[in-house]
Image (cartoon, rainbow, N blue to C red):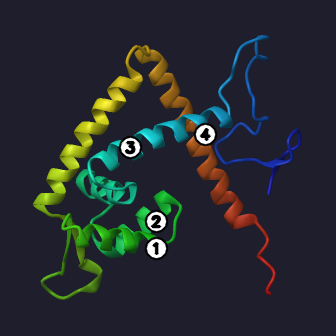
Amino acid sequence: MQTNEATLAPTIPGSSGRPNRTGPEPVAGTDILDGQDIRQAQRATSAVLGTVLAEHGTTSDLWVVLDALATGAVPPERARFVPRLSAALATGPAAVEAMIDQAEAAGLVSIVSAPDGDPRAVRAELTPAGRAQHETLRSAIDHVAGELYAGIPEQDLAAAHRVLTEVTRRADGWMQLWSVTRPAEPAR
């Protein structure tokens, strides 16, 4: 494994290998985006999302399932849906199974067996109530997002998107590298 000598951090595939803060030195008295800023923005927007969802009688877990199925962000076959959503949420398969079960119990998702009985082809599908709930929630979330982003120049939003996408890509790369190169945990 290669490391960056300045930080002793692993070199992430696709990164320059330079220390965290790259580019010109910060100008005195100015702020530079860092992990704390990202955490604060994530915390604040998650709180807003939680409030919007609660006002519509749903939870973030239900929203994740509804949105994933409505947008096609993950394949609907349960055998593929569970691991993909599990990886995206950094949670275990049991938690995703519980989310699906919760959505099914609420009448928002139905589990459809394959005509040939193939268990790998069992699908999670939105019910009409699930589609309606997703549309209502998407509209409410889009409205709040519009309010949050109002007045921020489009070029600033585009720059923030590019930076956060790159940070996410690098963090994902680091986690992949770390999972391959870390020593196995000792047996207990």
N-terminal label among 2 and 1: 2
**Near-viewer residue (6 or 164):** 164
Question: Based on the displayed image, in which of its 4 quarters is residue 32 positioned?
Answer: top right
| Amino acid type shown at disc 3 | Thr
- Place of residue 126 in the rendered image (x, y in percent of width and height, measured from the top left): 18, 62
- Place of residue 72 in the rendered image (x, y in percent of width and height, measured from the top left): 27, 55
**Residue highlighted by disc 2:** 86
Which label sits in the foreground, 2 or 3? 3
**Residue highlighted by disc 4:** 39
N-terminal label among 1 and 3: 3
Q: Is residue 65 visible?
A: yes
Q: Is residue 165 visible?
A: no
**Label 2 to label 3: alpha-carbon separation:** 24 Å
**Label 4 to label 3: alpha-carbon separation:** 18 Å
Residue placed at 33% from the left, 26% from the top?
146
**Residue highlighted by disc 1:** 93
N-terminal label among 2 and 4: 4
Q: Secondary structure at mark 2?
A: helix
**Near-viewer residue (175 or 70):** 70
**Residue highlighted by disc 3:** 51
Residues tagged 2 and 1 counted as in contact (Cβ below 8 A): yes
| Amino acid type shown at disc 1 | Pro
How crowded is the residue under tag 3: few (<14 C-alpha within 10 Å), some, or many (20+)? some
| Amino acid type shown at disc 2 | Ser
Residue placed at 76% from the left, 76% from the top?
184
Image side of residue 82 versus residue 43, left or right: left
N-terminal label among 2 and 3: 3
Q: Secondary structure at mark 4?
A: helix
- Place of residue 144 in the rendered image (x, y in percent of width and height, measured from the top left): 33, 31
Residues tagged 1 and 3 counted as in contact (Cβ below 8 A): no
Image side of residue 96 versus residue 70, left or right: right
Image side of residue 45 versus residue 184, left or right: left
